[in-house]
Image (cartoon, grey):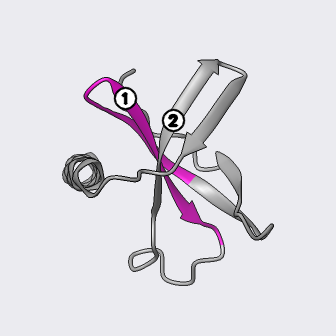
Amino acid sequence: MEKFIPAEDDTMTLTFDDGVEMECAVVAVFPVGEKNYIALLPLEAQDKEEAEVYIYRIIADNEDDVQLENIESDEEWEIVADAYDEFMDNEEFEELFED
């Protein structure tokens, strides 16, 4: 899977263990090693620059059946968070030259 930046209206609803639902914008889908990850930003976030981004591992049996898994290990989290930060830095850098 190559890095993917979704359309502005791509959203996903997260349902937490306590039943609370949160509508999120899909920020990016990106590979790290042989696994794929998704970054989600809550739509209700007031300050998009400072809002918490949720990152999950994607498990896809096929195109119609996609599940999200929490990243449990600190080591995997560090690797994925660094990859996300680098991905976003590259996107911001490219946007500077598009304007």
Q: Position of residue 85 (x, y in %)?
A: 24, 56
Residue where numbered disc 1 is placed:
35
Q: What kind of residue is marked 2?
A: Ile
Task: Judge left or right: residue 74 versus residue 30.
Answer: left
Residue under the image location 71 percent in, 64 percent down: 17
Task: Judge left or right: residue 9 versus residue 3.
Answer: right
Foreground pick, 9 / 95: 9
- In which image quadrant can residue 36 be found? top left
Residue where numbered disc 2 is placed:
58
Residue extending farthest to the front is: 73
Q: Position of residue 23 (x, y in %)?
A: 71, 62
Up-down relation of residue 17 to residue 37 (above or below): below
Residues in magenta, as a range: 26-43
Q: Check if mark 1's residue and mark 2's residue have beta carbons within 8 Å.
A: yes
Q: What kind of residue is marked 1?
A: Lys
Q: Secondary structure at mark 1?
A: strand
Residue under the image location 67 percent in, 50 percent down: 11
Instruction: Examine the residues drawn in magenta and state their main secondary structure.
Output: strand
Up-down relation of residue 85 to residue 4 (above or below): below
Q: Secondary structure at mark 2?
A: strand
